[in-house]
Image (spheres, helix red, strand yellow):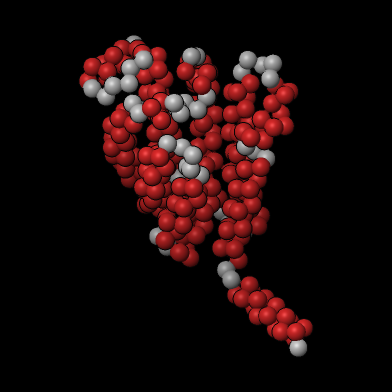
Amino acid sequence: MEKFLIKSELRRLWSIIKSLDKKIVIIFISVAVLQTISYYYTSRAFFRHYLFQYFQSDSNVFLIEYYYWFIGDFFTYFILPLLIIKFLMKEKISGYGISFGDYKAGIRITLIFLLVMLPLIWFVSSLPEFNRTYPHLASARNSWGIFLLFELGMFVYMFSWEFVWRGFVLFGLKKHFGYYAVLIQMIPFLILHNGKPAPETFGAIIAGIALGVLALRTGSILYCIITHMSVMFSIDLISVLRYKNDDYGIGINSFINIIKTIF
């Protein structure tokens, strides 16, 4: 009797599995696997534990650590999803946001978004929890060369980050879930901000939704990459300028004082 019940339940489960949309299953399982690979193998923690000893004599060891993370996650979040799309799902890459899409709307909305964000960035960069956090690489505060290398690596990372959430997940789920896919991709995007300053993490809810809508509106992830990277670059640059001037005010005098540093 017990064996009969087990077989019956297994047949029922198999029937349910066969009825599922294979593409949706592939996307959800793939993201779970990719995120696990990122956490355990292409993270800074992995580098610290297994590779740091081989580079610790290098003065730029922490920059190397970040580049391990940036390039590792580029492979995990961009190259592997591309292979999944092309060889497992047998679909075109262009259907996942790798195109210019509606570039007029993309440029217009991106500019509006940045005009809204820049005053907010100016304000939050004065907060202790932000100026302690950005840029993530402390040595980028003291060398413009290292700063630029760090930002270049961050761009590579942002490209892959936007692709996996706004490209692979969002466009992959769009046909089945419609605009609900915006909310689905926002959740992991938010969770991966945990540990950052609280205002930024709460802001990731709004940003995740806004970037998702932007991607669907334009049919492209390129404007999400530009927007996200512009925000990151701005917070890093302003934080460095504040650090160099030891000025964490938000008034016009602080703004003028910090601008002078650039020139």
- Residue found at x 68% / y 80%: 9
**Picture quadrant of residue 253:** top left
Residue 97 locus on image (x, y percent): 48, 49
Taking 6 as reference, is 117 left or right?
A: left
Q: Mark yes or no: residue 117 visible.
A: yes
Taking 175 as reference, is 106 left or right?
A: left
Quarter the N terminus occupies: bottom right
**Picture quadrant of residue 202:** top left
Residue 78 locus on image (x, y percent): 58, 43
Taking 147 as reference, is 46 left or right?
A: right
Depicted 199 relative to depicted 216: above or below: above
Quarter the C terminus occupies: top left
- Residue found at x 41% / y 25%: 131
The single residue placed furthest to the left in the displayed view is: 252
Taking 234 as reference, is 37 left or right?
A: right
Name the one closer to the observer, 250 or 185.
250
**Picture quadrant of residue 85:** bottom right
- Residue found at x 52% / y 57%: 172
Q: Mark yes or no: residue 94 visible.
A: no
Depicted 81 relative to depicted 73: above or below: below
- Residue found at x 50% / y 50%: 188
Residue 117 locus on image (x, y percent): 32, 36
